Amino acid sequence: MSEQDETSNWEQYEVTKEKFIQVIAKNMNLYGITSSVGRLYGVLYFAEEPMTLDGMRDALEMSKTSMSTGVRSLTDMKMVESTFKKGIRKDLYKSEEDWYKSFTSLFSNRWRHHTETNIEEADEAIEELLTIQKDTSSEELRIKIGNDIERLRYAQNYYKWLMKFIQVIESGEIFSLIPKNNMD
C-alpha cells in the first residue's frame, strides 16, 4: 500500500471517529447534557490513555475552564473518573466505558430528582385544595376541587410507580429483565 493510501486511511479513520463523537454529543442532549460536554465524553471515550485538562483543551479547542466544568459534570454523573499515573502530577481523567452503568446512574439521578419534586408538588397542591374545599361555600367549587384532587391522586400513583421503576434501574434489576447485550 502506498504512503498516500495509508495517509488517506488515517484521515478516513479520524473522520469516522469524529462522526461518532458527534453522534454521542447529540445523544447526550437527551439527558440534558450540552453537546460540548458530550463531545468531551466522546473524546475521552476514544482516548487510549487518560487525559489531562490541557490535553482535552487541545483536542477540543475549548477553554480550560469549560473543560474543567465539563469534566466536573461528567464526574458527578459517574461518566468520567479521575485516575492516577505514576510520574504525572496533573489530574488525569478517563471515561467510564460501561455505558450501562453510566445510563443507570444518569437516568436514575435525573429522574429521581424530578419525580420527588413532582410528588412534593402534588402533595402541596392537594393540601391547599382541601383547605379551599373546606372553606368554600360554593358547591360548584367543591366539586371542581374534588375532581382535581382525583387527578392529582392519579398523578401521585403514577409518580409512585415511576419511583419503583427508578429503583429497578438503580439496583441493576433492570438487567435481569432486559439483559445487557454481549459483544458479538
Image (cartoon, rainbow, N blue to C red):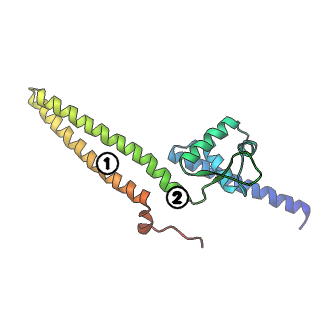
x, y percent for residue 147: 17, 39
Q: Nearer the viewer, residue 13 or 90?
A: 90
Crowdedness of circle 1 by 10 Å Cα count: few (<14), some, many (20+)? many
Helix, strand or loop at mark 2: helix
Please identify the quadrant where the N terminus is shown. Answer: bottom right
Crowdedness of circle 2 by 10 Å Cα count: few (<14), some, many (20+)? some
Where residue 101 is drawn, which disc sits there? 2
Where residue 159 is drawn, which disc sits there? 1
- Tell me what residue is drawn at x 41 percent, y 44 percent: 113
Which residue type does callout 1 highlight? Answer: Tyr
Q: Nearer the viewer, residue 93 or 112?
A: 93
Q: Is residue 35 visible?
A: no
Q: Is residue 20 above or below residue 54?
A: below
Q: Earlier in the sequence, mark 2 or mark 1?
A: 2
- Tell me what residue is drawn at x 16 percent, y 30 percent: 131
Q: Nearer the viewer, residue 93 or 35?
A: 93
Q: Residue furthest bottom?
A: 184
